[in-house]
Image (cartoon, rainbow, N blue to C red):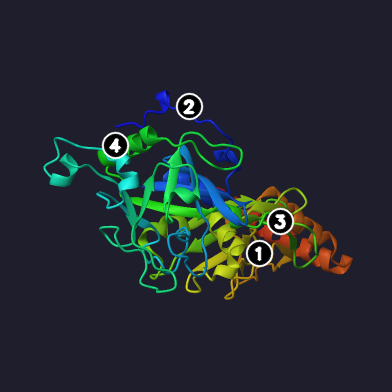
Amino acid sequence: MNFPDSNIELVGEYIQYKDLIPMAQKYVKNFDGLVVIREKELPVEGRKRATGTIWYKNQVLGFTVEDITREKKIKEQTAIPANLTFISPPSKGYYNMVLDTTGNDAIKSNYVKFPNDNRKKFKSPGVLIRVGTSENAITLYNNPDLSFDGIRIHSGTSERSSAGCLIYSRQRNKDGTLKNDVGINQELIKYIYYNNINKIIYIDHFDLSDNTDYNLRGKVIDGMDNQFLKGAKINITTTYSQSTPEVLKEIYSYNFSTTTNENGEFDIRIPPIIEYIISNKTKNIYDKNSTFEVSFYFPGFNEMKKKIVDGNGDYTPDLGIISLKPVTKLNPIPLSELTLEDESKRQRELLSLPETEINAKLSKQKNKLNDLVKNTRDNIILTFFS
């Protein structure tokens, strides 16, 4: 079943896909579940409300509003924490999502019945969306300071319409409140049911630093003569550890290659996973057992590797001068990698030698050539006149 996007006209402004950070883009596009993008925390009447959007497979499905997250939960308030993290909680890296009944009479108007489903509650009275960490989505946390039963996604107008639940609508007002929209909530329930969607993640997009320098830059030079190396190969690799949640391994594993420009310089966007880690360093989400590495290589030079993020999660965007050392005679350049530029460099090195050394090298090459000519001549004579 396709979400009825042809019948839905979203009313209100939101962060477009192209303006999301790369990490959020990757989840919105590839995650096998719903993605909640928390865009802003708006002050209102001595408190705050969090506004956002719901996405599935690169399609925005509507607007959200909820209470903000807190270190210590306030009863019947406080939204669930964002779970785009790489350590517990939650251990799986996402929340489970199920369809279930509710004891809250105020939101039973959102119920959807599925007459052909053999499960009693799906036939009557109906079901709506429950979100949690347990498989039946009843439990979120056992922490007494931050404990929730499974929260709901339902209709309403603001964070005051819920006790920590996510309010969903197709229309957003300028103050972040929503139009009470039972119909779109019922469509979402049907969409989840028929597409068997059972996961959801929350991304605090507003919490990402806007002034963080995400680019990686530097200059690659010849360690012998300090000349820049045009076209040096740069490869960024990230690898996950065994402790990384299964759902995040594809994102944690990243490979990217590029080359230096004509001046030996590079200025490239870092991988989304690293961007998210350095933006949320204070949340202690860096997995010290995973690696983030950049390597530099140029034909005729030894490869150099550098760690992008250190063991504390610190990131330095400017790597400065990367000085590659030429290979030794015991490690010659493979013929397949030899270029005209490499040969020109050898000629420059030859011309920089003292005249006596140049003459000695030329004399040696001349003797080799004479020997080759003589041997070739002797072979021809033996072949035709013996």
Instruction: Examine the rendered structure and indicate whether residue 150 appears above or below residue 159.
Output: below
Residue with the mark numbered 2: 9
CB atoms of marks 1 and 3 within 8 Å: no
Q: Mark 4 or mark 2, which has the lower sequence index?
A: 2
> Relative to the observer, which residue lies in front, 111 or 8?
111
Q: Nearer the viewer, mark 1 or mark 3?
A: 3
CB atoms of marks 3 and 2 within 8 Å: no
Q: CA distance from mark 3 to mark 2?
A: 34 Å
Instruction: Examine the rendered structure and indicate whether residue 142 appears above or below residue 193.
Output: below
Residue with the mark numbered 3: 211
Mark 2 falls on what kind of element? loop
Can residue 232 be seen from the camera position used here? yes
Image quadrant holding the N terminus, namely top left
Q: Quadrant of residue 139?
A: bottom left
Q: Mark 4 or mark 1, which has the lower sequence index?
A: 4
Q: Which mark is residue 301?
A: 1
Left or right side of 280 for 121: left
> Relative to the observer, which residue lies in front, 345 or 294?
294
Q: Position of residue 313 (x, y in %)?
A: 59, 71
Q: Which mark is residue 232?
A: none
Q: Mark 3 or mark 2, which has the lower sequence index?
A: 2
Q: Mark 1 or mark 3, which has the lower sequence index?
A: 3
Q: CA distance from mark 2 to mark 1?
A: 58 Å
Q: Nearer the viewer, mark 4 or mark 1?
A: 4
Residue with the mark numbered 4: 190
Q: CA distance from mark 4 to mark 1?
A: 60 Å
CB atoms of marks 3 and 4 within 8 Å: no
